[in-house]
Structures are given as structure tokens and as C-alpha cells.
Amino acid sequence: MNARVFFAAGAVSLGLLTAGLQADAIVVDPIEVGTGLFSSFVQIDFEQGDTFVFEVFYNETTTTSFDLLLILDSDAELGFQLEFTTSGFRPFVNGFGFDGIFESDASSDSFWLCWTKPSDEETWALAQDGAANTVATPGSWDGWVFGNEFPGLAPKNVIIPAPAATAVLGGLFIGCGRRRRKA
């Protein structure tokens, strides 16, 4: 077995072992949006099952969870939809749309709940002060879940593949393709 295949097989085994530690986790590649020195993650779990993760870049240390949504909504090429109303001094998220999916509380008795966690290694907690009053910190996560129960289900556990792991796995497939062409 040549060294490249052995290394790639080891990386795949390590990845499977890691995934086994989080049996209920799904692997999601984040979609990068915005510009700036800092980034936080926004995860949208649609009721019908799809999960999307966005890595949102920003510059201001006062950026809130709701501001992250506005950054997503302002990117015309992304095609993200944010529907909200303002009640008193706080915005209330009514609906999200992305990749051909749109879920809104206007058409059902369900609603969107915001959950937060300081990093991908922490557990989810409800955003007690709401999205407009929760300040994003570098590496923090906001998770939005659509449902009809309070507090409902926490966002899904996701695994973001490390860039090096993606490169190794990509190299494995390229290497396999190369071997087939030579034969």
C-alpha cells in the first residue's frame, strides 16, 4: 500500500471514529457570507429536515444575532430570505427561506426559536434575551429551529469538516481516480 493511500485511509478512519463519538451529528459544509475580521455561525434547521450552516463574517463587536440574519438577507447572490416583524423594540422572526425552502409562522401554528452556544463544543441554550439583544462573539453559534412547541427541540448537532480533512479526502478521491486511469 503506498503512503498516500495509507495516510488517506487513516484520515478516513479517524473521521469515522470522530463521527461515531457524535452518533446523532450530521456533516455540513458552512456557506461563507459577508466580510470582516470576525465570524460566527448561523444554523437554520427547517422543519421538513434540511439544515444549513452559514459562517457569517462581520467587523463590529456589537453585532447581534439578528444582525447576522440581516447580513445573510442583504447578500443578493445568496438568495436567503428573512421575514420579520417589529413588536415594541424587538424584531420577531416570522420566516426563513433558502435553497427553495420557505417556512413561515404565517402559514402554520409553528414558530422560529433562536438558540445559542459560545462555540461548536458547547451545548445549545435558548436565547433568553432574543436575537436582537444577543451579541455574537467570534466563533459563536446561533441555531434557529421551526416548531410548534416551547422550548421545542434544540438545533441538530453538526460537524463542520476541517479544511485539512476535506483536502485529504479530496486527495483520496483524486488519487483513486488517477489509479483507475493508469490501469
Image (cartoon, rainbow, N blue to C red):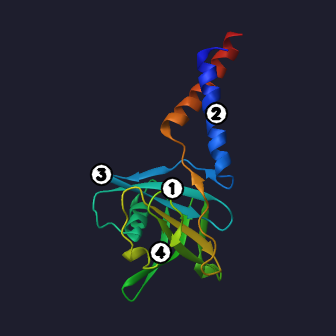
| Of the two numbered discs 4 and 3 in the rendering, the one whose residue sits closer to the viewer | 4
Q: Are marks 4 and 2 in contact (CB under 8 Å)?
A: no
Labels 3 and 1: the sequence-earlier one: 3
Q: Which mark is residue 127?
A: 4
* Label ID, residue 37: 3
Residue 182 lies in quadrant? top right
Amino acid type of the residue that numbered disc 1 sits on in the rendered structure: Glu
Left or right relative to 96: residue 66: left
Image coordinates of residue 152 in percent, x first then y, are 63, 76
The secondary structure type at the circle numbered 1 is: loop
Could you say whether the residue bearing mark 2 is in a helix, strand or loop?
helix
Comes first in the chain, label 4 or label 2: 2
Q: Please, is residue 21 above or below residue 109 in the view?
A: above
Crowd class of label 3 (few under 14; some 14 to 19; many from 20; radius 10 Å): few
Measured in 3D between alpha carbons, the distance from the residue under mark 3 to the one under mark 1, in whole angstroms, is 22 Å
Q: Residue furthest bottom?
A: 88
Left or right, 114 with respect to 183, comes to left
Task: Check disc 3 and give the amino acid type.
Answer: Leu
- Counting residues from the N terminus, which is met first, the one under dot 1 or under dot 2? 2
Q: Secondary structure at mark 3?
A: loop
Quadrant housing the C terminus: top right
Q: Is residue 159 visible?
A: yes
Q: Is residue 9 above or below residue 137?
A: above
Local packing at callout 4 (Cα closer than 10 Å; few below 14, some 14-19, many 20+) is some
* Amino acid of disc 4: Ala
Q: Earlier in the sequence, mark 1 or mark 4?
A: 1
The residue beneath circle 1 is 121
Q: Is residue 99 visible?
A: no
Name which residue type carries label 2: Val
Question: Which residue is denoted by mark 2 in the rendering?
Answer: 12
Quadrant location, the N terminus: top right
Q: CA distance from mark 4 to mark 2?
A: 36 Å
